[in-house]
Amino acid sequence: MPETTYLQAISDGLREEMRHDDTVFCLGEDIGAFGGAFKVTDGFIEEFGGRRVWDTPLAESAIIGTAVGAAVEGLRPVCEMQFADFIACGFDQLVNVAAKMHYRQGLPVPLTVRLPSGGGFSGGPFHSQNPEAWFLQAPGLKVVAPSTPADAKGLLAAAIRDPNPVVYLEHKHLYRRAKGEVPEGRYEIPLGKARLAREGTDLTVIAYGAMVPLALEATEDMAGARVEVLDLRSLVPLDHDAVLASVRKTSKVVVLHEATRSCGVGAEVAALIAEEAFEDLDGPVVRVSAPDVPIPFSPPLERAVLPQVDDVREACRELLAY
Amino acid sequence: MSTTTAPSAASGSSEPFRHSPPVASSEALRLTPADRRALLHYMLLMRATEERALSLYRQGKVPGSFYDGRGQEAVSVGSAFALGPRDRACILHRDLGAHLIRGVDPGRVLAQMMGRAGSITGGREGNMHFGDRRLGCVGMVSMLPDMMLVACGLALAFQMRGEQRVAMTWCGEGSTANGQWHEAMNVAGVRRLPVVFILENNQFAYSTPNDLEFAVDPVERAGAYGFAGVKVDGNDVEAVFAASAEACERARSGGGPTLIECETMRMHGHGAHDDMRYVPRELFEHWAARDPIDRYEAGLREQGVDTDAMRAAVKSELDEAADWALAQDMPDPATASEGVFADREPVLGDGRAPWSRWEEAADA
């Protein structure tokens, strides 16, 4: 299998879905002739034309709102938010119109919203956020966050084919850094299924997105301890079985995410474990995350806020010694 | 009577309708005597359904509050009457007439108000926040005017597939202050979408009067977005119909969107809890004398239509509808968590299109 970047895998996945299904189209800011701020849709307008690769006005409500209308009328729109942060401007259409549509009136909304997310490059408070927890509070939305090129392609295909609105978080840090073997052709990674990134017996780090490679790096050499790394892949639906199976095996859990701490995915996973696997624990569930602050611009400040390899290693060491 | 504003300063063009080519002749947009009776029928049906719902509310059978469109019947009936079967609608809470035209049964509306299992949303939504997808309606949300953008998306789908279909949606003048209104107007103009925006200026956004809502009449803005804005007497059902039919034709022929401002008055409070003390008495009386149903009924009577018989038929329809609605069960609490996610593809059905023009089209 050829080795591909995470960015290329997303681009390939989107292109293949568009080639296969002419109801799939994409819309967003600067995605046409410019190919998108990160070049995910580079070359798309030449292949698919301006109707299916719509360079929209700078208006996120318009992007998501028109996509909702097109979706209920039988198309499969894929919206690009130029940065995940800008979803705030289209939030109402996503959480009030799209998310609640099927529950309220039995009308599915097959809609994908791509969110280039995450920090680590001095993007500052408005180009670095990880807003996934906002969507965990909006029943009706599915939320995925791939960590590898192969998952990025397969989860995007699954998101596009799903009859529900799916929030697809693609971490900018992984775009050109994450490389891996990606199957050729169309395939699907099912929504709601976690992946064991590394098997272990002594402790589990539960992570997703860019924190998965960080967890693998941080726990590669833990003085003989064998650390399991569980890649959630989907945040909604959350793979309860995979989480609980790993807890029952290792009895110690660190939940790691780049997003802020309070009411985040880590809190949800910790609560799940407390409710369902309390008896299996040999120590407290530990969260490693950004603190509850905006993402600052200057590199030393940003590094202080975002989880680093040493933070993960230290948390694991302490929990292993508990 | 209607006035039209065209794109002017923005385009710098002397052509009055840069994006608005002429449409089918008025002959093609005519109303037969049966059509005129239908217009009155749907206005009577809307008022009777809402009066019945209000009495159910006062009997404590409608949970929450109650919202209606009294005084605005000509707007929803006149506009929706122009729609063809395969057109789609995002209908507002003051526009029950549009639902009735598209084929929603009054009994299911009353059941909807009462949160019954047999209603349009099975109790998931209350009052007027519904849409019957089987009849091509995407139901509104409370955030206004969100559905304008959804209607743009429906229209986008028609345009991408090369279909001669129209998306129609309604908004209040209150929502013209919201950013999404402007995003929708801009997107519709940029893409020349086959969408018709019916703007109901009912004088008040809840309690806030026009002069605190905008500095410029919203119809004037249409030209700035590159398409036609038309202002009509919203209490004249045929004037609303004529402007809507022309706008739909323009949309179908690739001429892009139209904004139609219908000047009217909300004759009830924002909701049943609202005593309207902020409405000046003279204003209320001015509009009360221009009731859209009374005006239209008087005209049809002069033409020999037995409107008493029409009223009696509507009353007996509502009696049956109320009996049916009251006989519906409340939803099973065990189902409250079902249906958050879909496991099948969306299907919007076609709506009823009672305008004689569509019968002829179907016959041909």
Image (tube, coloured by chain):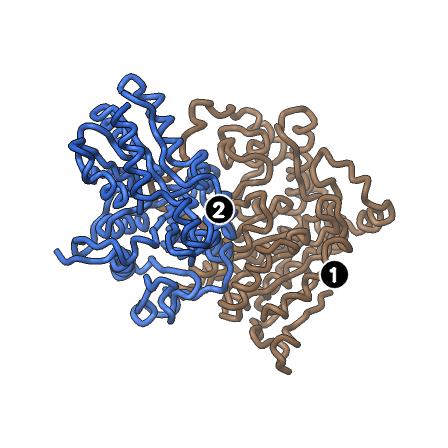
Chain colours: A blue, B brown
Which corner quadrant holds the N terminus of chain B? bottom right
Task: Indicate which disc residue A294 carries.
Answer: 2
Label 2: chain letter:
A
Q: Amino acid at mark 1?
A: Ala
Seen in the image, is A7 located left or right of residue B204? Answer: left
Residue B338: quarter of image: top left
Please indicate, yes or no, whether residue B137 appears anywhere in the rendered image. Answer: no
Measured as percent of width and height from the top left, residue B320 is found at: 59, 31
Residue A311: quarter of image: top left
Measured as percent of width and height from the top left, residue A37 is found at: 39, 63
Residue at the bottom extreme, as displayed: B14
Q: Identify the element where label 2 is drawn.
A: loop
Seen in the image, is A244 located left or right of residue A106? Answer: left
Measured as percent of width and height from the top left, residue A316 is found at: 28, 32
Question: In this figure, which residue is indicated by the disc labeled 1?
Answer: B215
User: What whole-number distance in Å separates the C-alpha atoms at marks 2 and 1?
Assistant: 38 Å
Which corner quadrant holds the C terminus of chain B? bottom left
Name the foreground residue: A156 vs A1.
A1
Q: Amino acid at mark 2?
A: Pro
